[in-house]
Amino acid sequence: LLQLLGGDRSGFEVTPLLRQGLVSTWNEGGEEWIAVSRAAIERVLRESIPMERRRSLHLSLADGLENRPSGEWEQRFAVFHRALGTRTPAALAHLVELAESLAHAGRPMTALHLLDQMEMLADTPAVFLARRAIARAVALRTAGRLSESRDALAAAAPLLPEVAESEWMGRIEALELELTVAMGAQPSETLVERVGSRMEDGRPEVLLALGELAAVRGQLATADALLAAAVAAASGPTDRVATRARIGQAMVRMFGGETAEAERRLFGLVRELRGRD
């Protein structure tokens, strides 16, 4: 990046900055990242550069990256710097979409880093702040930071009137359901019904919640199919969602009078869990 701006990186050493806690690094998707460690420090650094100068630097970086041999890294950061340089609705929307795609591709830390830059933009339209809040909740969920994801989702609620598309409410409720199940809690029947009626969602947490609700209502065949789908969609046969779904399948057998089959399934699951540990 220094080369693109015509700067000189000789003498640039990261180690002293790391030692003083001024920057942090992480590795994700085979890429090593470095960023200022605290938002307050980053804000001071940014505000020391006049706004027009910052925009000019971002646009210079975007132009330079777009003119380089096109690779994934260059494409992502061209989008990033173009958004921060122009701040047009189209560029900001592209930045949010980029962060969402990174989160879904298993790069939540990189997604969070990009989204945090939008927080620094004082004149960001409210609709993009709403979309940023939702995308941030998704990235935190992907990173396994469930409590923080729920907090981010709660923070998005006051901004929802700014998002006209009805699909966003469906996405928020689906994520709320997913987080509730992932944290070991029982979602409300109303939430499960709303998510189930709005979309065909193949996420294991959603399938599990729908299966458990069908079982409670005595719809045993439907429950068994949904729970089996949850097991198939889970990350492994003994992860938290799959284990809960398999216990649910055993209970469905018991409710249907197949006591021996229910016991066989439960004892088999116990053996697998012990073998895993």
Image (cartoon, rainbow, N blue to C red):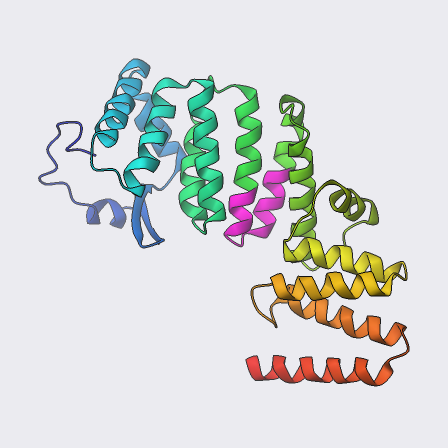
Of residues 23 and 72, the one nearer the viewer is 72
- Of residues 107 and 262, the one drawn nearer to the viewer in this rendering: 262
Q: What stretch is highlighted in magenta?
A: 138-153
Left or right: 2 as drawn, with respect to 237: left
Left or right? Give the position of 264 relative to 23.
right
Q: In which quarter of the image is residue 255?
A: bottom right
Residue at image location 90% in from the left, 62% down from the top:
218
Residue 121, compared with residue 29, is above or below; it is above
**Relative vertical location of residue 109 with respect to residue 239 in this rendering, above or below:** above
Q: Quadrant of the N terminus?
A: top left
Q: Quadrant of residue 58?
A: top left
Quarter of the C terminus within the rendering = bottom right
The quadrant in which residue 238 appears is: bottom right
- The residue furthest top is 52
Q: Is residue 224 left or right of residue 204?
A: right
Residue 260 in picture, x, y percent from top left:
83, 85
At horizontal 44% and vertical 41% (from top left) the residue drawn is 111
Between residue 16 and residue 131, name the one nearer to us: 131
- Asked whether residue 22 appears in the rendered view, the answer is no
Q: Is residue 149 magenta?
A: yes
Is 119 colored magenta in this rendering? no
Horizontal and vertical percent for residue 4?
Answer: 17, 30
* Residue 225 picture location, percent across and down: 75, 63
The kind of secondary structure the magenta stretch mainly shows is: helix
Q: Nearer the viewer, residue 262 or 85?
A: 262
Identify the residue at image location x=65%, y=26%: 165
The x, y position of residue 69, in whole percent, is 21, 37
Q: In this view, does 260 lie to the left or right of 37?
A: right
Q: Is residue 228 above or below residue 181?
A: below
Residue 233 visible here: yes
Residue located 24% across and 32% down the image: 65
